[in-house]
Amino acid sequence: MTGDRRKFRREGADQRKEALVRATLSLIAEEGVRGATVRAIAERAEVTQGLIRHYFSTKEELVLAAYTQHMNAMTDQTFAGAEGATAKARLAALVVASVTPPVVDPAAIGLWAGFLNHVRQNARMQEVHARTYHDFRDRLEALIAEVLREDGRAIDAGACRRLAIACNAVIDGLWLEGGALPEAFEEGELATIVVQSVGAILGLNLTDVEARQ
């Protein structure tokens, strides 16, 4: 078998698994984990149930793969907006990105709600949840530490951790409300609130930075 043929087969398998994960996420957003049966997933992905079992030994394996991809994508999508010449500018851009589309999205809230009860009941899902939460928070903590150093402020690791937890809580809360009740907020209102709130927690004025971007 040539290298090109091996690559073709591998890419084909990856694309089929990706289609199954997308179908699973779509159904969980609509029906919850229980509603995402193997049969329903197969119908949504337009494949046989046998093909699903070829790639995933159980429905749990497929749901776990879908949850992992969803959580990783959310973190990557949020941090993709963290651009700027300074750490302060990157932080301002990050918090704005976290409460605006495409990060804030009713479908993402539906997925969060669909997964939530399953996470509480499933140890492997809890592990993924803990890992992705800490990944986001650790990256936020590192950026906050950089911002404070840039501002000429010395802060110990424990204090920086607590600041990251507090900022993350604000971000999560506004993300949830913005996705669940988008019509309740004026255009740009959540971005203004999150910039002011995170700035207040850190003792910084992020509003002027955000306004210049």
Image: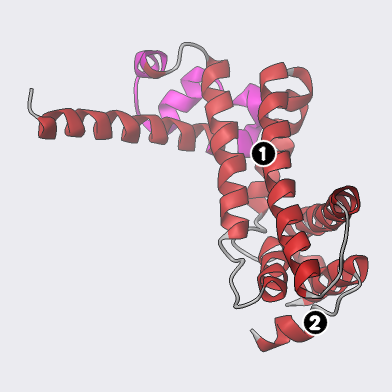
CA gap between label 2 and label 1 equals 28 Å
Element at label 2 = helix
Tell me what residue is drawn at x 34 percent, y 18 percent.
Answer: 51
Query: 37 or 167: which is nearer to us?
Result: 167
Look at the image and tell me in which quarter the C terminus lies: bottom right
Q: Amino acid at mark 1?
A: Thr
Extent of the magenta region: 26-54
Q: Could you tell me what secondary structure mostly forms the magenta stretch?
A: helix
Q: Which mark is residue 132?
A: 1
Residue 110 vertical placement versus 203 (above, below):
above
Residue 58 vertical placement versus 103 (above, below):
above
- Would residue 27 be seen by someone viewing this image from the given angle? no
Residue 22: percent from the left, percent from the top?
A: 47, 38
Q: Amino acid at mark 2?
A: Thr
Q: Which residue is mark 2?
A: 207
- Place residue 44 in its image quadrant: top left
Tell me what residue is drawn at x 64 percent, y 26 percent.
Answer: 33
Look at the image and tell me in which quarter the N terminus lies: top left
Query: 149 or 189: which is nearer to us?
Result: 149
Query: 94 or 156: which is nearer to us?
Result: 156
- Would residue 155 be seen by someone viewing this image from the given angle? yes
